[in-house]
Amino acid sequence: EDQVTQSPEALRLQEGESSSLNCSYTVSGLRGLFWYRQDPGKGPEFLFTLYSAGEEKEKERLKATLTKKESFLHITAPKPEDSATYLCAVQPSYGGATNKLIFGTGTLLAVQP
Amino acid sequence: KAGVTQTPRYLIKTRGQQVTLSCSPISGHRSVSWYQQTPGQGLQFLFEYFSETQRNKGNFPGRFSGRQFSNSRSEMNVSTLELGDSALYLCASSLAGYNEKLFFGSGTQLSVL
């Protein structure tokens, strides 16, 4: 069964304290792995898509990496405005043309000033 | 450019009733997906529509249904509501195809009493 597991469930950091979030996945063929950010009361907002092992993408203080079984979201010198729930999702390669995603339950990140 | 619009923002219903939720995608987007988000299960895929046709369906009972109109607007309906249907229902749109980033609305928070 296709599955996405994120850890930790919650993470509290001091401003400037770098860390990483983990997303491990089991899927019968990976078409793409997505990272989203969700703020309270809002829908998820797209951050990155990774397609193959070894790929890396960066945006401001965030860097996403991908291996054959997991992805990491590295947060460098976080600021309080980085506080949010970070969601990982995979799109299997089967199922034809579709945008269906399988989501993990997310990591709730709190950055304290 | 306007984002994905979902109405209503909040709904309170009682068991046994039915409910219809509405989603207006970003202009030009032809694919609309629906997800259910609960604290315990995270985001779970309900269904996806493309050019008025259901392209994919998740593992939800037949009480959950949807449709898409010629202007790409979409509605989802839940009949015979149960307490467990209480959740945030999110709509997401994308241009077309597959493996595309999704743009989410802020969701409809449904409470079933």
Image (tube, coloured by chain):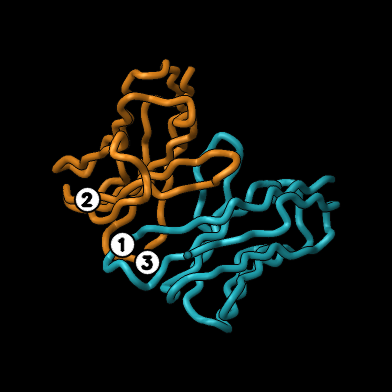
| SS of the residue under disc 2 | strand
Query: What residue lies at 32% left-to-right and 48% top-to-bottom?
Result: B47
Query: What residue lies at 48% left-to-right and 70% top-to-bottom?
Result: A27
Query: What residue lies at 38% left-to-right and 25% top-to-bottom?
Result: B81
Tags 2 and 3 touching, CB below 8 Å: no
- Horizontal and vertical percent position of residue A3: 53, 62
The part of the image, by quadrant, that contains residue B91 is top left
Query: What residue lies at 14% left-to-right and 43% top-to-bottom?
Result: B70
Please determine whether, in this image, residue A47 is positioned above or below residue B111.
below
Q: Which residue is mark 2?
A: B54
Q: Judging from the image, what is the letter of the chain drawn in orange?
A: B
If you read the primary sequence from the N terminus, does the residue marked by circle 2 or circle 3 appear first? 2
Res. B99 mark: 3
Q: Amino acid at mark 3?
A: Asn
Work out whether disc 3 and disc 1 sit on a shared chain.
no
- How far apart are the two marked residues, 1 and 2, measured between alpha carbons? 10 Å
Q: Chain of mark 3?
A: B
Q: Which residue is mark 1?
A: A98
Classify 10 Å Cα crowding around label 1: few (below 14), some (14-19), many (20 and above): many
- How far apart are the two marked residues, 3 and 1, measured between alpha carbons? 7 Å
Extreme left residue here? B70
